[in-house]
Image (cartoon, rainbow, N blue to C red):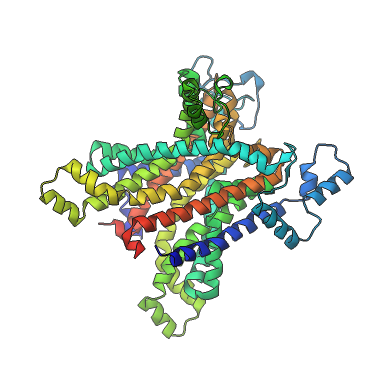
């Protein structure tokens, strides 16, 4: 990809990010009534205190001025104060972010590890028992409500069988010294096997719940793409040359067949980000998604606004990178 | 189209799924006649009463009772109204808006296309559930707000589809012929192009109803959707979360209802797609 093309793509990204910021900013304006009054409801606030909060939030200024100020502060990572936590919103978000990243990465790893072998096998043995099972599984995966599946897993594996913990990211006693905030990584850095096992045990059920719909989609994509590749002339040629089935799939088919899987996996990050909110709520996972839900109920609007913006910007950037990755991997697009 | 829909009949699974969807619609429409109990009637003596086939169960309350002693089956039957109403209304509203915007963007092109496509790109920048959660957080819970919060983003799906189809259709001979005969842009868009691109719109619409139902249930589960005492499957699952240790049925049955309805819609819509889209005929 030429630098000019790359700059063009980045140029397309800027208006989208600006548009996303405008919408997130305007969300606050949709609040029926005065946000300052709503935030201080049931706290016996005096009119002077409400006026002070309104002033602090900039609600007494014209909309355009507020937007410019919002963007200016957001670019510096300043999203105001979280009234509930009595600390800057950015600090509170950064504390919860590692847990969400850890869960998302684990869910993505689960989805890829399950979907790729199943999708490839379903395509290779098309019409067979495995193909049918995988197709039914994929249909179930996209039809299952994540929150309900999570609760079923809790009932089965945590409550009845007692194999896995019910909630949280790690037991208090097993907590490793905080370095990255990622429990699995911190446990490894501290060389603590007990912490690592504890963190992994906590991660299993939420990661499967979050990753299942993605695994179902990726399985379908891999199967369809592999079926397409296996029909190509170069595969027939490889077969005619006398190469073994396994060798053809591993050396020739997988490289092209997994191209759409990688791209769709990156694009499906949005469903992971959204699913985080639900899964973190079900499993009491101390991440950003649960923080947002909790913040809504205490009307912590600045935090909700900042988190929604962070999710959206992450999603836009990941999609942009997926697009670039597809261009780099696919020679036809590169031309 | 009718003959193609007729082709669905030999497919047993699709027929079963279609019947399933129909059963849910009938259940929702005639809920007051079908439900064995009043879904809002509380009876603390029946608090967390197990399903009928378990010890202490009662066939008057076949699927047991929740923490307030309300009949779970009756609440599931009434909950179907919320799920189906929101699924259908959101998709209908989004389809009308999306089709109009997509036709305008694809046919008129230029500044109209840039404006609509720009808005679509921005809305696609939000993960769906997060966008809906953000809006519901600001607007407050309730059925109307939920319909709006979901439709604000849902229209993007048919819009993108219709824009693409319209871009291809505007270069075809039948559109050129209409243009040569002096037809206005509006009559070409509505009278010529729209009937020819309706099939994929219907197919995508049916699939989207299933997705919107899951989103509605997710929002209600998070406490941002339909508010008590109205029965909603998502909030029923949430209510049961506190009792998973000793009353599994409170969460399990409403979730099963969501899964069954969404599964039936997904299977049926796959068959509709196969029947309406010529590319799948061979």
Q: Is residue A50 visible?
A: yes
Quick check: B214 above or below B102?
above
- Furthest toward the top, the residue is B55
**Percent position (x, y) of residue A282?**
55, 31
**Percent position (x, y) of residue A273?**
52, 44
Q: Is residue A317 left or right of residue A20?
A: left
**Percent position (x, y) of residue B155?**
53, 58
Quick check: B253 above or below B177?
above
Q: Is residue B190 left or right of residue B279?
A: right
Q: Is residue B242 left or right of residue A328?
A: right
For the N terminus of chain A, give its image quadrant.
bottom left
Which of the 4 image quarters holds residue A86? top right
Which of the 4 image quarters holds residue A49? top right
For the C terminus of chain A, give its image quadrant.
bottom left
* Residue found at x 50% / y 20%: A159
* Residue found at x 65% / y 54%: A75
Q: Closest to the observer: B126 or A255?
A: A255
């Amino acid at each position: 990809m030429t630098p000019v093309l790359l700059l063009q793509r980045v140029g397309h990204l800027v208006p989208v990010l600006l548009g996303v910021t405008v919408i997130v900013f305007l969300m606050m304006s949709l609040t029926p009534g005065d946000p300052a009054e709503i935030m201080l409801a049931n706290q016996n606030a005096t009119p002077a205190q409400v006026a002070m909060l309104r002033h602090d939030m900039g609600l007494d200024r014209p909309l355009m001025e507020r937007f410019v100020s919002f963007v200016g502060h957001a670019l510096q990572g300043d999203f105001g104060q979280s009234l509930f936590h009595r600390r800057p919103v950015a600090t509170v978000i950064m504390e919860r972010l590692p847990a969400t990243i850890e869960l998302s990465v684990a869910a993505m790893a689960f989805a890829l590890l399950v979907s790729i072998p199943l999708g490839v096998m379903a395509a290779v043995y098309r019409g067979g028992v495995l193909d049918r099972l995988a197709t039914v599984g994929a249909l179930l995966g996209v039809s299952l409500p994540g929150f309900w599946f999570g609760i079923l897993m809790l009932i089965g594996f945590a409550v009845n069988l007692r194999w896995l913990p019910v909630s949280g990211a790690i037991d208090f006693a097993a907590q490793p010294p905080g370095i990255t905030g990622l429990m699995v990584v911190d446990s490894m850095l501290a060389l603590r096997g007990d912490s690592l096992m504890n963190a992994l045990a906590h991660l299993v059920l939420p990661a499967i719940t979050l990753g299942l719909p993605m695994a179902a989609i990726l399985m379908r994509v891999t199967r369809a793409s592999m079926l397409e590749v296996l029909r190509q002339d170069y595969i027939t040629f490889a077969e005619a040359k006398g190469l073994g089935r396994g060798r053809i799939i591993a050396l020739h088919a997988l490289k092209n067949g997994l191209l759409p899987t990688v791209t769709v996996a990156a694009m499906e990050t949005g469903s992971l980000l959204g699913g985080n909110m639900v899964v973190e709520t079900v499993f009491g996972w101390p991440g950003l998604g649960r923080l947002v839900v909790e913040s809504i109920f205490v009307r912590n609007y600045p935090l909700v606004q900042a988190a929604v913006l962070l999710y959206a910007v992450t999603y836009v950037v990941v999609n942009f990178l997926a697009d670039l990755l597809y261009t780099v991997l696919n020679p036809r697009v590169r031309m | 189209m009718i003959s193609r829909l007729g082709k669905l009949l030999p497919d047993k699974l699709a027929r079963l799924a279609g019947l399933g969807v129909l059963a849910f619609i009938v259940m929702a429409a005639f809920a007051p006649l079908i439900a064995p109990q009043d879904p809002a009637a509380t009876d603390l003596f029946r608090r967390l009463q197990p399903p009928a086939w378990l010890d202490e169960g009662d066939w008057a309350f076949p699927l047991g009772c929740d923490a307030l002693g309300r009949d779970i089956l009756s609440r599931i039957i009434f909950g179907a109204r919320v799920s189906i109403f929101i699924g259908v209304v959101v998709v209908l509203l989004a389809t009308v808006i999306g089709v109009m915007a997509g036709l305008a963007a694809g046919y008129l092109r230029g500044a109209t296309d840039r404006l609509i496509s720009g808005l679509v790109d921005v809305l696609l920048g939000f993960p769906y559930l997060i966008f809906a959660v953000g809006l519901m957080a600001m607007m407050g819970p309730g059925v109307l707000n939920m319909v709006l919060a979901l439709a604000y983003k849902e229209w993007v799906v048919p819009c993108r589809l219709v824009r693409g189809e319209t871009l291809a259709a505007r270069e075809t001979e039948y559109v050129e012929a209409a243009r040569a005969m002096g037809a206005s842009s509006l009559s070409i868009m509505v009278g010529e192009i729209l009937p020819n691109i309706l099939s994929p719109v219907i197919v995508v619409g049916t699939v989207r109803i299933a997705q919107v139902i899951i989103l509605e249930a997710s929002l209600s589960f998070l406490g941002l959707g339909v508010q008590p005492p109205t029965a909603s499957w998502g909030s029923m699952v949430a209510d049961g979360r506190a009792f998973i240790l000793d009353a599994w049925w409170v969460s399990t049955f409403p979730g099963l209802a969501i899964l069954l309805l969404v599964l039936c819609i997904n299977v049926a819509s796959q068959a509709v797609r196969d029947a309406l889209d010529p590319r799948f005929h061979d």
